[in-house]
Amino acid sequence: MAGRDRARFVCQACGAVAAKWAGRCEACGAWNSLVEEVATPRPGGLARPARGAVRGVDLVGLAGTTPPPPRRATGIAEFDRVLGGGLVAGSAVLVGGDPGIGKSTLMLQAAARLAASGQKVIYITGEESVEQVRLRARRLGLAEAPVELAAASHLPDIAATLEARPETGLVVIDSIQTMWLDTFDAVPGTLTQVRAAGFELVRLAKTLGFALVLVGHVTKDGAIAGPRVLEHMVDAVLYFEGERGHQFRILRGVKNRFGATDEIGVFEMTDHGLAEVANPSALFLAERRGHIAGSAVFAGIEGTRPVLLEVQALLAPNAGGTPRRAVLGWDAGRLAMLLAVLESRCGLRLSGNDVHLNIAGGLRINEPAADLAVAAALVSAASETPTRPDTVYFGEVGLSGEIRQVAQAEARLREAAKLGFASACLPLRLARGGKRLAPPEGLQLAEIGHLGDLLASFAVAAKTRKPDKTPA
């Protein structure tokens, strides 16, 4: 009875284990997520070592220095930026994204660049055939790159191949959901197989010293399928964001043991693969039209990189019923809070209008410093008064309408001055709040302490604006 196979039901959404099948997971509430998995124990199990065979661990103090780990630059500057300077030997990186977003294209380009520099690179695909990968390589102009390619999904065979090539520098697995071990009676892609395959590959990377990149699918909620169990195993987690109908792609780091988190790399999808975007601010603002009501430029920070983006707001009269709040690229809950502050603290009536908010360029903003730029776009749309085209906005808005300080204001101002902006609207530096900002040359600062000051500036602009002279 001890060696008998035991069936269990594992939730593919949260990883909870149940003794019998149910339509709804009791742990997370997901419906139809329980999948039967049969675990076949290895003969003998984990043997207990004999007395005296156990070796203790070495303990060290907090004092001391350790040299930084050596890195292998892929040659793709935006990819290396998100990684913190390049791939670390013995590290594991998980890259996730929607189907068709360009994950395989990016990994093939990085593998080809690294192989061209003299590193041994192995690319293993479990979803496509060898000929399909070769066809993509020819389209990208990478057919001559010395990348070793294989189409396999049985992990013991892959492990034997990797152990026979200890000089390998990079191994790409596309994708982890296709890998399987015959130790478990579960189909590939289930939680048991993904967890076991990921653990075995990470162990090989640490033992043999090669950099491992795992490509992972995402669920309909946007999380890497697994669920999130792989994120705890690996050293870095990168998400590839963007719309397939849009040319921009954002590679965002959400976890990195060897670098900064929330760092982004910007790419543009072209006929010849993914092209790096060295100056994303200029690209995001390239199609911006000035003197349009409902538009404001936000000076944001993504990781360590300042990025200027256009915030667009549109107000449409609501004939009846509940007003609609449509948001693209920002938090819908934060928009509701900002609208409530504008109505309660500033007297701006927007409850009878549908509100549409868009962050141009396809980038999603997560920092609260965008509050002031969103408020400026909303006030501009409500008053039908354009913002100044040479002004950037940043600052956090509190529930009482006050404008709060945000981090890295100097970097935001330098980016605005570099792109030719003449002024910046930002939170007021109080005497208790520390030193005054020294703006870059040619940039004027308009410091405000409350949203009422922002509305007053638009009222003045509306009075001084010349009426449109349109021929009858």
Image (cartoon, rainbow, N blue to C red):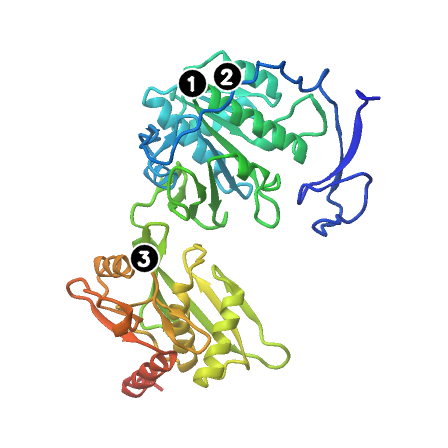
Q: CA distance from mark 2 to mark 3?
A: 47 Å
The amino acid pointed to by label 3 is Ala
Name the disc covering residue 168, or none.
Answer: 1
Residue 6 spot, x, y in % from top left = 80, 28
Q: Residue furthest top?
A: 164
What secondary structure is found at the residue carrying circle 1? Answer: loop
In the shown orientation, is residue 472 left or right of residue 436? right
Please tell me which residue is depicted at 77% across the width and 49% down the height of the picture. Answer: 24
What secondary structure is found at the residue carrying circle 3? Answer: loop
Q: Nearer the viewer, residue 137 or 433?
A: 433
Label 3 belongs to which residue? Answer: 286
Q: Are marks 2 and 3 in contact (CB under 8 Å)?
A: no
Closer to viewer: mark 2 or mark 3? 2
Q: CA distance from mark 2 to mark 1?
A: 8 Å
Residue 160 in view: yes
The amino acid pointed to by label 1 is Thr
Q: Residue furthest front?
A: 52
Name the disc covering residue 162, or none.
Answer: 2
Please tell me which residue is depicted at 52% across the width and 24% down the height of the picture. Answer: 203
Mark 2 or mark 1: name the one nearer the start of the chain: 2
Mark 2 or mark 3: name the one nearer the start of the chain: 2
Image quadrant occupied by the C terminus? bottom left
Residue 139 in view: no
Dot 2 alpha-carbon crowd within 10 angstroms: few under 14, some 14 to 19, many 20 or more:
some
Mark 3 or mark 1: name the one nearer the start of the chain: 1
Q: Are marks 2 and 1 in contact (CB under 8 Å)?
A: yes
What secondary structure is found at the residue carrying circle 2? Answer: helix
